[in-house]
Amino acid sequence: MKIRFFAAAMPAVTAVSLFASPALANEDALAAGDADVVETSAADTAVEASTKLGSAYSMTPVNTSISNGDRYALAQNGASAGGGMGAPMRKPSYTVTLNQDSFFGFNPSFNGAIPVSEKMDVTFYGTFWTKPAFGLGQGNTGDDLWTEFGVGLNFNLLDGKLKVKPQLGITNGSLLSGGERVGGATRGARFLDGIVPSLTVNYSDDKFEAEYYGGYYAALRQRNGAASLDFAHTWFNAGYKASKNVSFGPHYELLYNTRNTYPGGDTGKSYEWLGGYVQFSLPQGFFARFTGGSSLGDGDSGDFYKMSVGMSF
């Protein structure tokens, strides 16, 4: 492929245009002043154009470069390809994850991030909780399943290795609020069932990765002044990257019922897990993680396991 560009000499200014094909050259532009047209078939070869200029004319050199996909970037006097100084802003990202574990059941989720500055993103997320027990119990038809949605911020620190993400979500359903009671029977779900402030911290470099999550699920409504639940949920894991595709390490997780207004209800630990994980990652943005281990203390439902499959775009 040949690249054709022209430089039109004007007093104290040189205008340069770059064309991906000779057919795109506008011959009328050459009429604006004296100009030289140069063609080259080497994609990365620097081209120098010389003209016979009078003393009233000057020319500023312009560097041209070609990247993959036949995209062209112009850089003049140290300016970035986007026209400003410094590196281009990050692109928006979106991740869909399919999760299943021995307590929460199947719960697909999504996470998105929209860059708004060099180090900060606006984030949004959601979780489709599908476990029938999170609805109204017996008689649940699946149309009032617990649904969580939230927004927040993500701060990219240490050249992007450390990500700190505070978020605020809402839940909709009946798990925290107890749902509605009509005519002595419990039925129906609630919009704004609860609120979920959370903090997620991720670290990743060439050899080490770690994640912390802490969230508090607080009921915003109560069924007839009673029947509401609050939970604290937290986990931490840290792993070693054996290669670009495989990592593994320990995992700790705790779910604690901090408030229970049901008649005769009690608070306490729902589960406490300790185990390990192994993760396989591909450069295309796909990953699969399996986590498993044993419960700590009494009151748990036995060993635990969880599996996640993710796709990032």
Image (cartoon, helix red, strand yellow):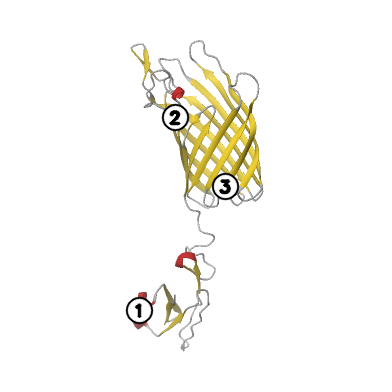
How many residues crowd mark 3 within 10 Å: few (<14), some (14–19), many (20+)?
Answer: some
Q: Which amino acid type is marked by label 3?
A: Ser
Q: Which amino acid does label 2 sit on?
A: Thr
Residue drawn at (51%, 10%) of the image = 264
The picture places residue 53, in percent across and down from the top left corner, at 46, 87
Residue located beneath label 3 in the image: 281
Name the disc covering residue 29, or none: 1
Task: Decide: is 32 above or below 86.
Answer: below
Label 1, secondary structure: give it.
helix
Q: Closer to the N terminus: mark 1 or mark 2?
A: 1
Q: Can residue 75 be seen in this view?
A: no
Residue 248 seen? yes
What's the CA distance linking mark 1 and mark 3?
Answer: 51 Å
SS type, badge 2 = loop
Q: Total marks drawn? A: 3
Q: Would you say the residues marked 1 and 3 are in contact, meaning their CB atoms lie under 8 Å apart? A: no
Residue 212 lies in quadrant: top right
Q: Residue at x 49, y 20 (%)?
A: 229
Residue drawn at (51%, 33%) of the image? 100
The picture places residue 142, in percent across and down from the top left corner, at: 38, 26
Residue 130: which numbered mark, if any?
A: 2
Quadrant in the rendering for residue 277? top right
Residue 276: image x %, image y %?
64, 35
Disc 1 residue type (three-letter)? Ala
Judging depth in this view, the residue of 151 and 236 nearest the camera is: 236
Q: How far apart are marks 1 and 2 (CA)?
A: 64 Å
Residue 9 on image: x %, y %: 43, 82
